[in-house]
Image (spheres, coloured by chain):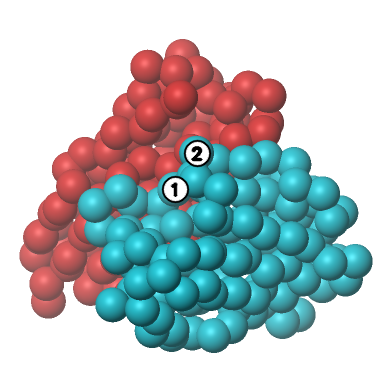
Chain colours: A cyan, B red
Amino acid sequence: KAGVTQTPRYLIKTRGQQVTLSCSPISGHRSVSWYQQTPGQGLQFLFEYFSETQRNKGNFPGRFSGRQFSNSRSEMNVSTLELGDSALYLCASSPGGNEKLFFGSGTQLSVL
Amino acid sequence: TQLLEQSPQFLSIQEGENLTVYCNSSSVFSSLQWYRQEPGEGPVLLVTVVTGGEVKKLKRLTFQFGDARKDSSLHITAAQPGDTGLYLCAGVDNAGNMLTFGGGTRLMVKP
């Protein structure tokens, strides 16, 4: 069974640009969650999607948005990038909720 | 907001030593998960503890959930270099909606 796939693996952007990250969950998993990981703040929850609906949302500004498609694949978008958005963005999938998360390898975003 | 504090933040030990990592909160969690993350990879789930006072063993790793379901510990016996990594605890709130991660313990086991 293929694991969670995140693309791209690395991304370099400049301030003010926008970026879209992609996540393909494990086949059959309907829940996809996104996390931001930085050395200073650790792993912080962005949002969770289940069956194309945002089910939970963390405490991030509206510049961070996401969506989920009918095949459970998910995308995350960050607009008007700031230097502080530099981080490892992790996607995790699960069959239905928080009982067991399977993480992808992440997208390392650098904002210059 | 539920917070999870992990201690120590960093730990560097020699192969063969024992160690304990702690995960504490003032909030009650319905369950608590432990993950290990290696450089360049996402976290991998090691164990989930659900019942207060529960103890689970995974080879040389022993996980305990506090009686009040507010804290947990991870004990590693005879650590090996392959145990090196970032250990994260994560608590699920009572509604089962939110998973909150601790700040992590970065463990280095030197041969």
Q: Is residue A45 above or below residue A110?
A: above
Camera-side residue: B20 or B17? Answer: B20
* Residue type at numbered disc 2: Asn
Drawn side of residue A11 relative to residue A58, left or right: left
Q: Is residue A24 above or below residue A90?
A: below
Residue B53 seen from this side: no
Q: Residue furthest right?
A: A70
Residue A47 seen from this side: yes
Secondary element under disc 1, as helix, strand or loop, is strand
* Residue type at numbered disc 1: Gln
Q: Would you call the spot at circle 1 few (<14 residues within 10 Å), some (14-19), or many (20 or more)?
A: many
Residue at image location 53% in from the left, 24% down from the top: B29
x, y percentage for residue A94? 72, 56
Q: Residue B7, labelled with which disc?
A: none
Camera-side residue: B105 or A21? Answer: A21
x, y percentage for residue B3? 38, 29
Query: Which chain is disc 1 placed on?
Result: A
Secondary element under disc 2, as helix, strand or loop, is loop
Query: Which chain is disc 2 placed on?
Result: A
Q: Quadrant of residue B17?
A: bottom left
Residue at image location 50% in from the left, 39% down from the top: A59
Name the residue carrying label 1: A44
Asked if the residue under mark 2 is in contact with the one under mark 1, i.e. CB atoms within 8 Å, the reply is yes
Q: Would you call the spot at circle 2 few (<14 residues within 10 Å), some (14-19), or many (20 or more)?
A: few
Q: Sequence-wise, which precedes: disc 1 or disc 2?
A: 1
Q: Residue A59, labelled with which disc?
A: 2
x, y percentage for residue B15? 14, 67
Drawn side of residue A48 relative to residue B104, left or right: right
Residue at image location 67% in from the left, 59% down from the top: A66
